[in-house]
Image: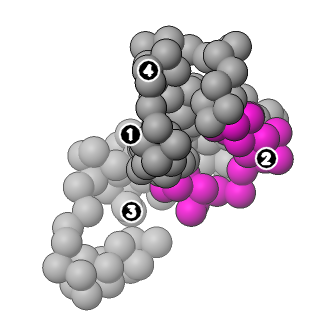
Amino acid sequence: MAKILADYESISGQKVNLQKSSIIFGMRIGHQRKRVIQGILGIDKVGGGGKYLGLPEQFGRSKSEAFKGVVSRVKENIGGWYNKFLSTAGKEVLSKSIAQSKPVCSMSCFLFPKQVCEEINSALSEFWWGKNDNVIEP
């Protein structure tokens, strides 16, 4: 892993900030081995409980719960526009440029559970057709 990081730095010209980096270990890795690996890599922080780009660093058993933040961001974005008088073109532009773009980064990295995709589609459909139930107002 240390060689991979060094190769990445030399090829890309970018340097990995080891003070900001954290490492995640599996449950079966012993304490002594963890310290050795941390020493080799030069990474002091052990992480896994935080968020990166709005998504959890680690997923629990329920992936649907992990992606609830993405669904709520989509709903928050369209929530303020519900009672506005928008033309069909205005709704389409708002939907495509704002609401549909929110989950794209996350979806390019992770396979979303079907339930989460259905919630996003449902919120966008409700916005398009004018239904205003279960939407988070900003």
- Residue 25 pos. (x, y %): 60, 48
Circle 4 SS class: loop
Q: Residues within 10 Å of mark 1 (few under 14, many from 20)?
A: some
Which quarter of the image is occupied by the C terminus? top left
Q: Of the residues under marks 3 and 1, which one precedes in the sequence?
A: 3
Q: Of the residues under marks 1 and 4, which one precedes in the sequence?
A: 1
Name the amino acid type tagged 2: Pro
| Residue at the disc numbered 1 | 45
Q: Residue at x 25, y 87 (%)?
A: 11
Asked if the residue under mark 4 is in contact with the one under mark 3, i.e. CB atoms within 8 Å, the reply is no
- Residue 128 pos. (x, y %): 62, 36
Magenta-tinted stretch: 104-125
Please indicate whether residue 69 sits to the left or right of residue 12 in the image. Answer: right
| Residue at the disc numbered 2 | 113
Residue 3 appears in the figure: yes
43 vs 134, nearest the viewer: 134
Which residue reaches farthest bottom? 11
Q: Of the residues under marks 2 and 1, which one precedes in the sequence?
A: 1
- Disc marking residue 84: 4
Name the amino acid type tagged 1: Lys
